[in-house]
Amino acid sequence: MAEEKDFPPNLLTEEMKHSNGDFVAPDGLCWLSVLSCLLLACSYVGSLYVWRSDLPRDHPTVIKRRFTSVLIVSGLSPLFVWAWREFTGVRTGPSLLALMGIRFEGLIPAVILPLVLTMVLFLGPLMQLAMDCPWSFMDGIRVAFDPWFWMLCFSDMRWLRNQVVAPLTEELVFRACMLPMLVPCAGPSIAIFTCPLFFGVAHFHHVIELLRFRQGTLSGIFLSAVFQFSYTAVFGAYTAFIFIRTGHLMGPVLCHSFCNYMGFPAISTALEHPHRLTVLSSYLLGVLLFLLFLFPFTDPSYYGLPTPVCTLTSSPSSLCLS
């Protein structure tokens, strides 16, 4: 483990420290950080509804229009971080892009290790998928390297939304932009669990469309919304953890895309599977290996110690140390 004395001096303003070196947020910093995150979340969700349409959300026309609006908001989202930094007076050594996880140092491990870690967690669903897939392993390899297959994928608006645009824009807005604003106020540990609340609440907008198109009963829609909030909040905490530990945006984006592809694990189906013991054992093994590899695979020393967002703390957090 890195020694605390090796951690570079923090880059916060002197008003943010007591004489004994303990961190103290200046008056109004936390309120301004939370309000900035709330405004950013509202801007992202609100951009989905600037288009008037009677079509459902999965219609290609609706998806294309929403691509335009969320890409504009996401492109402007760094301005929220810049404005927050100017108003609060928080001095940062790393550039704005580096704070948002857009940098080259440690990029290769940031692309590989978090995704492998997430795949380990999904060992059970992956085993279940492999058992039920009619293709052989070699068939899968051939499809993966077939340009026509990828052309079909990128021409499918739903696939493009779920695997590319949503992971990229949501991780940029809800992790890369919000965490640098929350960490100086709350510290890395609390920020990991605070940031996903904005992400989870942002997904409540699906309730509007379910009610609008009468897709289920009121109680069913409410339970679905509560479940989705819980699931997205837990997932958001996980990707926030990856972002802080690695200091890269790419890892959370790839993990988000993979989880969107896999969906929530079909545990009920696993319980009824013909090879139930093997599948359930894979579920358990995946969780155990995930917990075992969680910290080693996200060791900040692989990605450039300290990660940029960790320089926003007044003292080194255990999350920022190897």
Image (cartoon, grey):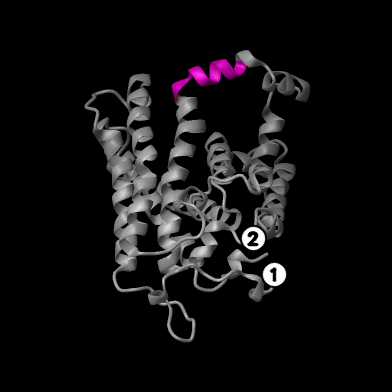
Residue 207 visible (yes or no):
no
Residue 209 position within the rendered picture, expressed as x and y whole percent measured from the top left: 29, 35
Q: Where does the magenta region start and end?
A: 149-157
Mark number, residue 2: 1
Rounded to the nearest angstrom, the CA distance separating label 2 from label 1 is 9 Å
Residue that badge 2 annotates:
305
Q: Residue at x 24, y 28 (%)?
A: 51
Residue furthest top as drawn: 148
Residue 158 position within the rendered picture, expressed as x and y whole percent measured from the top left: 45, 25
Marks 2 and 1: CB-CB under 8 Å? yes
Residue 40 visible (yes or no):
yes
Mark 1 lies on a secondary structure that is loop
Q: Nearer the viewer, residue 171 or 226?
A: 171
Q: Is residue 203 above or below residue 182?
A: above
Crowding at mark 2 (Cα within 10 Å: few <14, some 14-19, many 20+):
many
Query: Of label 2 and label 1, which has the lower sequence position?
Result: 1
Q: Is residue 228 above or below residue 34?
A: above
